[in-house]
Image (cartoon, grey):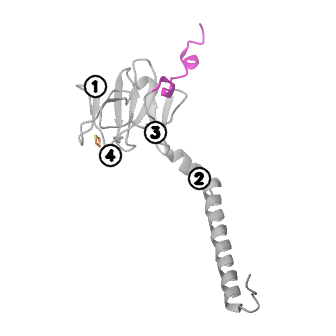
Amino acid sequence: EPNTDKHPRRAFLKWLWAGLGTLAFIEVLVVMFSFLSPGKKKKTADQASAEWVDAGITDNYEPGSVTAFVQGRFYLVLLESGGFLALSNRCTHLGCSIPWESDQKKFICPCHASQFDMAGKVLTSPAPRAMDIFPVKIVNNRLFVNIASRIRRQAFHPDQLVFPDQLKLRDPQS
Ligand code: FES
């Protein structure tokens, strides 16, 4: 063991490295903590409501229909089952926007010809997974789509469908 009193330069370097190591460690902690801590920026009520796009009354949609919302970059789909789904218009292959081909009843990507069915399920690759969806909520028979919260999914699942509140549609006399 070298006597640090006799080697002041070595002692100084030792302290320097220890100090730098501690700083790096603290920096890692700070970065980790900033990832873990919940969003610092609180959204205002205005911002939060701007994320929910009003898609109109549920009765305006025909079962088996696909309606494009160009501004919101999504399609509102009403399946024959009566369930609603909001599909992102971006291809899950490389992100091209995908038109709905109503005559073929498919989404066909113009870039590399991936095809998806009405529920966004992949029919033809190279698309690796089903079209992304956005949360849908129905309030008093009015549809709202949250365009700020894209949801990735591997495949279509019936749980993803949103149904109008049947109780509200029922005749109160019966
Ligand atoms: Fe759609 Fe490639 S981007 S198939």
- Helix, strand or loop for disc 4: loop
Q: Neighbour class for label 3 at 10 Å: few (<14), some, many (≥20)? A: some
- Residue 43's tag is 2
Q: Which residues are magenta?
A: 157-174
Q: Let me know if residue 79 is in the magenta part.
A: no
View quadrant of ligand 1: top left
Q: Closer to the camera, 42 or 156?
A: 156
Among numbered discs 3 and 1, the one appearing first in the sequence? 1
The single residue placed furthest to the top in the displayed view is 174
Query: Mark 3 near mark 1, Cβ–Cβ under 8 Å?
Result: no
Residue 38 position in % (x across, y down):
64, 53
Query: Could you say which disc has been placed on residue 152 in the image?
Result: 3
The answer to which quarter of the image holds residue 37 is bottom right
Q: CA distance from mark 2 to mark 3?
A: 23 Å
Q: Quadrant of the N terminus?
A: bottom right
Task: Give, as a three-letter code, the residue at label 4.
Answer: Leu
Residue 100, position in %: x, y? Answer: 28, 33
Answer with mark 2 or mark 1, whichever residue precedes in sequence.
Answer: 2
> What amino acid does circle 1 point to?
Lys
Q: Please give the residue where the numbered disc 1 appears in the rendered image.
A: 105
Q: Is residue 113 above or below residue 103?
A: below
Q: Is residue 156 above or below residue 35?
A: above
Per the rendering, the mark at residue 94 is 4
